[in-house]
Image (spheres, grey):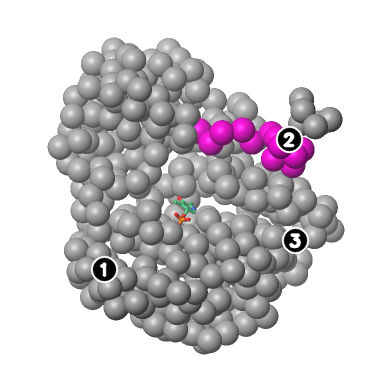
Amino acid sequence: MTLGRPLLNRRLAAFGTTIFAEMSALAVRTGSINLGQGFPDTDGPEEIREAAVRALRTGHGNQYPPGPGVPELRAAVAAHQERFYGLTWSPDTEVLVTTGATEGIAASLLALLEPGDEVIAFEPYYDSYAACIAMAGAVRVPLTLRAPSFRPDLDELRALVTPRTRLLLLNTPHNPTGTVLTPDELSGIAALAVEHDLLVVTDEVYEHLVFTGAHHPIAALPGMRERTVSVSSAGKTFSYTGWKVGWVTGDAPLVAAVRAAKQYLTFVSGGPFQYAIAEALALPDAFFTAFREGMRRRRDLLAEGLRAAGFRVHEPEGTYFVTTDISPFGEEDAYAFCRALPERCGVAAVPVSVFYDDPEAGRSQVRFTFCKRDDVLEEAVARLGRLAP
Ligand SMILES: *Cc1c(COP(=O)(O)O)cnc(C)c1O
């Protein structure tokens, strides 16, 4: 205690350090292969990196770019949404460039929520959701995705809606479970949103990493355009997670509201990378297909290795994570398991339990990423093979 009370305010005090910082530090300290945090160990397309260099050299974006984002990127986001999903957005009023999807989510929640509003979100959560809901003074209401299927129960969802519910926070493909919402599930969720006049914020950063079925944006469903804010980013799709270029799309009044919050968070987002990502979004379909198929191969490599090592493996339909259960090792506590894993075999992972409000639901789940080079995954699998179940 100093200055009369704890420095970190009550809204944030519960969150502490993110688990990624903790497990990545442990991986560094022990010289372990880090399959905890989801960042690729190979950069994305070289021509996109060169486009960023060109933008820097020619002074494109070296001074404050326009608040909503550079026109080239807003046009490219709109063209991408039309090419892949048939969604049409005005680049001028219905696209907003953000500093990664993280800012898109934060600005959406800060703009759209009043203190006391309830937000229904799938747990396990992506870790920024709970913190942003708290920063907005709103109340999170979990819809628990339970092993082994990790499918949302729509009756359970319906039962969670109260007169205070304002917003559904979706994530498909879902990190960490790999669940991809089906057209039926999306229709059910959309019908509920329309019936109760709810807003939807949907995090679709893994839109190009769907291995089973296809990605369907909920914004395309009847009645959803005027109530849905869609968030995505370049980090995962183009393997440049450090660039932090994201975007929000939606009906003009929604995007105007999100822009009102964004302008006081970052004012504008970094310039030169925006020009490069505008080019990335225009890459031919073959790029997106090759990216997905390469990741599918790595998913299979890691999933098989984990299975052979004794884990119970949940095969993800999308994203770049595999969720496993450690019960076959006679262990139940994912957090303790992950703290010990680097010393035991030189591999780091993250406990999924920390992404649940319900401590029992994820108690024995551990997440591994497969967005790493083949040789790194092969070495990790060999090391994990030394764990005796
Ligand atoms: C990685 C990730 C993000 C963050 O995206 P940035 O563009 O890096 O801010 C958001 N949501 C999910 C589900 C993610 O996995």
Q: Which residues are magenta?
A: 8-19
Residue 260 appears at what percent x and percent y? 67, 72
Q: CA distance from mark 1 to mark 3?
A: 39 Å
**Marks 2/3: CA–CA distance:** 25 Å
- Quarter of image, res 164: bottom right
Q: Is residue 307 left or right of residue 349?
A: left
**Residue 14: horizontal and vertical position, in percent?**
69, 34
Residue 50 lies left or right of residue 173; in this view the side is left
What amino acid does circle 2 point to?
Leu
Question: Is residue 175 shown left or right of residue 243?
Answer: right
Q: Which residue is mark 2?
A: 7
- The numbered mark at residue 108 is none
Quarter that holds the C terminus: top left
Question: Along the polypeptide, which appears first: circle 2 or circle 3?
Answer: 2
Label 1–label 3 contact, CB within 8 A: no
Disc 2 from disc 1: Cα separation: 41 Å
Q: Please, what secondary structure does the residue beneath circle 2 have?
A: loop
Instruction: State the residue in front, 208 or 116.
Output: 116
Picture disc at residue 113: 3
Q: Name the element at disc 3.
A: loop
Classify mark 1: helix, strand or loop: helix
